[in-house]
Amino acid sequence: GAECQRFTAVIHDSEGSISHQAVHHRPKRGWIWNQFFVLEEHMGPDAQYVGKLHSNSDKGDGSVRYILSGEGAGTIFIIDEVTGDIHATKSLDRERKTHYVLHAQALDRNTEEALEPKSEFIIKVQDINDNAPKFPDGPFVATVPEMCEVGTSVLQVTASDADDPTYGNSAKIVYSILQGQPYFSVDPKTGIIRTALADMDREAREHYTVVIQAKDMAGQVGGLSGSTTINITLTDVNDNPPKFPQKNYQLYVPESAEVGKPVGKIKANDDDLGVNADIKYSIINSEGANMFSISTDRETREGIISLKKLLNYERKKTYTLHIEGTNTHVDPRFSYLGSFKDTATLKITVGDVDEAPIFSMDYYILDVYENSPSGTEVGAVTARDPDSRNSPVRYFMDSKEDGERYFRIDEIRGVIRTMQPLDREDTPWHNITVMASEVDNPNLNRHVPVTVQVLDMNDNPPEVSTEEEVIVCENSRPGQVIQTVTAVDKDDFANGQRFSFALPSHLPVNPNFTLKDNEDSTASIIARRRRFNHLTQELYELPVVVWDGGEPSLSSTSTLTLRVCPCQRHGKIRICQGEAFLSSAGLSTGALIAILLCIIILLAIVVLFVTLRRSKKEPLIIAEEDIRENVVTYDDEGGGEEDTEAFDIIALRNPAAAEELKFRRDIRPEARGHCSLPHNHKTPSVELDEVDVQEFIRQRLVEADMDTSVPPYDSLQTYAYEGQGSSTGSISPLDSVAAPSEQEYNYLEDWGPEFRRLAELYEDSESDVTT
């Protein structure tokens, strides 16, 4: 059989005789081909015979030469040129290369001509079992829940074999378990690992190591094998209830413990992991649940016990708590194991602590009437020592409170009194803090808020609200309501909600307005006459008396200002300002400002023009060739005797009077005598005694020459003197200007009724002059 396998092809003659048995017979150009086979991994000393090539042109005389080409020709495969025998010179590995493709050719040795065309054939490498199975992905890690049923699939492992699976059993693998029994098993064909033992407990054993073997040749003796390791971990399920390490616990809690603060811990153990070990704690008896609460710490899974109410050693010294711990995630598959909860008893002992005094109330609300005298009792607070010894208590006000102090407290009895009269309208409520401490331990104190309400007394009179201006329309009719007024009172509604109004009774009846009390704490101002005129009188004042309904009743008088304004229809105010005449013209504010600016500018120009004209001097000499006599001509028309400013003739007629009036800078010669009117009608006049008129004129001439303010040329000054010496004196009124008249006109009344009016006129005129 081996001989036939190595022969894959022979060359036969035309009759088709075959020297060896052929597996495949097909005539083609004189060649009959079969596949050549060569065993892999040949380890013999000689080259391995593969097969023989032969052509029908070969007569056996050595004239035919065989040539081999293709993959491995000359290196792996060699051919005998004379006989056509093919040998493999190297050991072959099928897993590296399964076959080789070569070409054969027969040549005439003498001529080198091709006797046969080049033909292709294949040499296949025949497999032997030289590769063991392997697990390319190992080692493996797997998990399976604890307490699972037998046969639960854990993991499937697969081995690979490099040998030819189509030839023999070299690649046929069978799985078996080398380590891990009796807990796990493996399917020999599929490699699926399954649990083999029921109720495997993670809490008893969590990790397992399983070794699986894969063997080829269908597991027969002589087959090759490989193995891998699988690390299997049991995952947790909730199959264990919580358990308290002990059934009874004790805890000491001082009575001073704060509400809401933790006072102790308790813990139940659970062998499970994760959420399967979560525990909820609860107090199941009413005695403990009323005073304490319990919560779960998620990190430590401990039960935290807190205080719900203040403890009192004197009232209750011990408490008993029944605490239950329950799993929050229960698996119904394991309900047959029992209830997943446990209970324990906790006995709490309350410790005695020296406590601060306790007030009888959490806060106090007291009241006192305003304006009460200093020392009035407001109320009292009480506190006691909660301890069994019941120490005395002292009261005091909180010294940290800022501001003015209105109250004081009796340190023994706790009575609160006022320190000064209170004003409800200033501060209706007072908030104070009272503190109490034990006499034996002043540092241990407690405080309580006290609110004092100041009760109202009717101590503020009402007032008429004057915030809005009262407008009276010009076209108001008698009986028309001008406006409704109200009153305000600083006192509260108990004393100030009812107001009455009236006009003052001690004043005469107002002809313009009257007041009507509406009996609803309002009053109406009513017009009493027809039509008002703001040009005649714009403002009116109306005094109003208002009193409240308190005990005792208080009143006040307020004066309302009523403004008269033109109104449109239905009493709508049109305008009330003083600039109504401008607004009625339709001019805006900007236009009015522009007009005023223009007027101011024009006035400034006129004033500047007049000032310039006054300061400008006329030249006295018109031109150089206009040389005339130095005579100054004035065209001013005199004002008669009344015009004493234009030309003062008194300086010539009466030099003494000129000195008195100073209208001109004339020098009066010394007078030596006076002239007077006869009888009782004395008019003071200056009588010149031996006056030298020539000397007087000479002095005036010298003065004119020396005066620097007159023109620098000669001027004509005319002087006249009427003389003196008249026995009757002058009757000219010019003589009497120098001094005020002291004439009495009463004598005119003696002349008869006709002259009485004349005397009155003179007396009035004389009085005006004196004034």
Image (cartoon, helix red, strand yellow):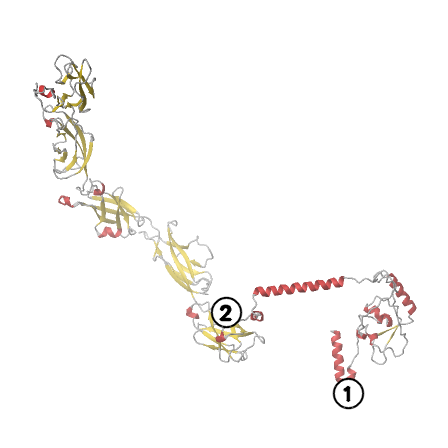
Left or right relative to 768: residue 33: left
Q: Dot 2 surroundings within 10 Å: few (below 14), some, or many (20 or more)?
A: few
Q: Dot 1 surroundings within 10 Å: few (below 14), some, or many (20 or more)?
A: few
Disc number placed over residue 165 in the picture, else none: none
- Whether tag 1 and tag 2 are in contact, CB under 8 A, the answer is no
Relative vertical location of residue 340 with respect to residue 409 in this rendering, above or below: above
The N terminus, quarter of image: top left
Residue 25, image x, y percentages:
10, 24
Residue 82, image x, y percentages:
15, 14
Residue 699, image x, y percentages:
89, 65
Disc number placed over residue 752 in the picture, else none: 1
Question: Toward the viewer: 564 or 609?
Answer: 609
- Alpha-carbon span between mark 1 and mark 2: 67 Å
Left or right relative to 398: residue 185: left
Relative vertical location of residue 208 with respect to residue 328 in this rendering, above or below: above
- Can residue 449 be seen here? The reply is yes
Label 1: state its secondary structure: loop
Q: Residue at x 83, y 78 (%)?
A: 682
Label 2: state its secondary structure: loop
Relative vertical location of residue 152 with respect to residue 494 in this rendering, above or below: above
- Residue of label 2: 468
The C terminus, quarter of image: bottom right
Q: Residue furthest top?
A: 61
Question: Toward the viewer: 521 or 67?
Answer: 67
Q: Examine the image and state in which quarter residue 83 appears.
A: top left
Of the residues shown, which amino acid type is indicated by label 1?
Answer: Gly
- Can residue 692 be seen here? The reply is no
Left or right relative to 713: residue 315: left
Question: Toward the viewer: 129 or 68?
Answer: 68
Of the residues shown, which amino acid type is indicated by label 2?
Answer: Glu
Relative vertical location of residue 172 with respect to residue 345 in this rendering, above or below: above
